[in-house]
Image (cartoon, grey):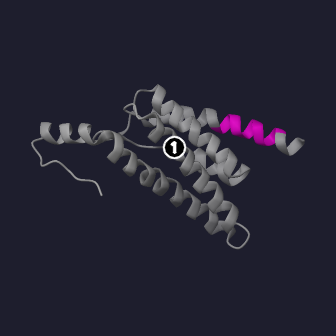
Amino acid sequence: MEKRTQCIAGGGHLAAIAAVLRLVGSAIRFGPFSVSLVLIPLVLSAALHGWGMGCWLGLVFGAVALLSGDAGGAIVTVLSKGIACGAAAGLCCRWLHPRYPRRSILLSALAAPLVNTGAFLPGCRLFFMPLIHQWAQQAAMPAPELI
């Protein structure tokens, strides 16, 4: 019971930190995209409390992105990529930690943004291609094609 209480309390604290980092990180931009500082507490929660807590913080990440208006409206893409990167970080830690304790944290920290971007690209292709073509027209550039 004590471990479960610690998990819930730790997850709540890290969710609050993730929400604040998401809102602060949205002010730092590279073109139309904002920096995702929220992946730090997401990986930490996944390492400490498991892949389920990583999924929860990924959901918080996506929900705060939607509420901040930074997501562009594709609810399925935003929520699924957040949940997927939390799950990837947690599963990476779970599978690798018994044999490689230090490397497991590093690899889960690498897996989270890779999965986040990897899930974003198909969602971008499905939902955002007209917007990307509009941006390309406004910048007088040829329209990009995503694979």
Kindly identify the residue that appears in the image at 65 percent across and 39 percent down.
14
Q: What x and y, as percent, mark residue 119? A: 45, 51
Q: What x and y, as percent, mark residue 70? A: 39, 31
Looking at this rendering, what residue extends furthest in the bottom direction?
A: 99
- Identify whether 105 is placed above or below 77: below
User: Where, quadrant-wise, is the C terminus in this rendering?
Assistant: bottom left
Kindly identify the residue that appears in the image at 63 percent across and 36 percent down.
15
Taken as a whole, is the magenta stretch helix, strand or loop? helix
Query: Is residue 15 or residue 83 the one in the foreground?
Result: 83
Query: Is residue 74 or residue 52 the one in the foreground?
Result: 74
Left-right relation of 19 to 138: right
Q: Does the magenta stretch include residue 143?
A: no
Left-right relation of 43 to 130: right
Looking at this rendering, what residue extends furthest in the front direction?
A: 126
- Identify whether 111 is placed above or below 54: below
Q: Give the range drawn in magenta.
A: 5-14
Count of marks, rendered view = 1
- For badge 1, the amino acid type reads Ser
Which residue is under mark 1? Answer: 80
Kindly identify the residue that appears in the image at 71 percent across and 73 percent down.
99
Q: What element carries label 1?
A: helix
